[in-house]
Amino acid sequence: LHFEVTRERAAAAKVGISQVDWALADTGTLVQDATAIDKRLVSTLPTIHVAVIATSGLLPDMPASLAEVQPQNTGYIAMITGPSRTADIERVLTIGVHGPERLVIVFIDQLGGTN
């Protein structure tokens, strides 16, 4: 099953689902090779972002993830740490202004080999 992802469809969607490459245990940051624009659209425009990751992608920290990244093969690395947050000059915190209001992370064990 394949969905054509466009800016309009992603902006109108309530939920965007993407596969991420790594998750960092120390900060909860997700790291994704988001060279393909459809990965960026589904992780930034819908209200809810569901990130799916294999448990084998769990790494201890940023240095470990940087060792995994292949810069010669990667045009855009996205680092996602929770829902979008911003505060104005009066320090009023607002969630979801520049991205999803909610981030759901789903870890999946890959049992029985890779398919």
Image: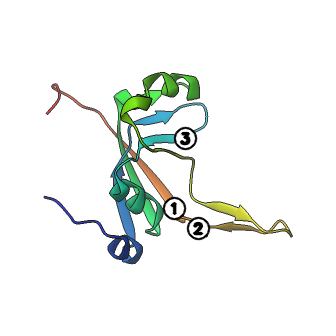
Dot label at residue 110? none
- Identify the mark nearer the N-term, 2 or 1: 2
Residue at image mark 1: 102
Residue at image mark 3: 29
Asked if the residues shown at circle 2 and circle 1 are in contact, with their CB atoms under 8 angstroms apart, the answer is yes
Distance between the Cα atoms at labels 3 and 1? 14 Å
- Identify the mark nearer the N-term, 3 or 2: 3
**x, y percent for residue 75:** 42, 42
Q: Does residue 48 appear to the left or right of 86 in the view shown?
A: left
> Which amino acid lies under the numbered mark 2 shown in the image of this protein?
Gly
**Is 65 drawn above or below residue 34 in the view shown?**
above
Residue at image mark 2: 96
> Which amino acid lies under the numbered mark 1 shown in the image of this protein?
Arg
Nearest to the observer: residue 109 or residue 39: 39
**Which element is circle 2 on?**
loop
**Disc 3 crowd, CA 10 A, few/some/many (<14, 14-19, 20+):** some
Residue at 61% from the left image edge and 36% from the top image edge: 27
Q: Does residue 15 appear to the left or right of 112 in the view shown?
A: right
**Disc 2 crowd, CA 10 A, few/some/many (<14, 14-19, 20+):** some
**Is 95 drawn above or below residue 78 in the view shown?**
below
Distance between the Cα atoms at labels 2 and 1? 8 Å
**Which element is circle 1 on?**
strand
- Identify the mark nearer the N-term, 3 or 1: 3
Residue at 51% from the left image edge and 22% from the top image edge: 64
**x, y percent for residue 103:** 49, 56
**x, y percent for residue 13:** 36, 73
**Disc 1 crowd, CA 10 A, few/some/many (<14, 14-19, 20+):** some
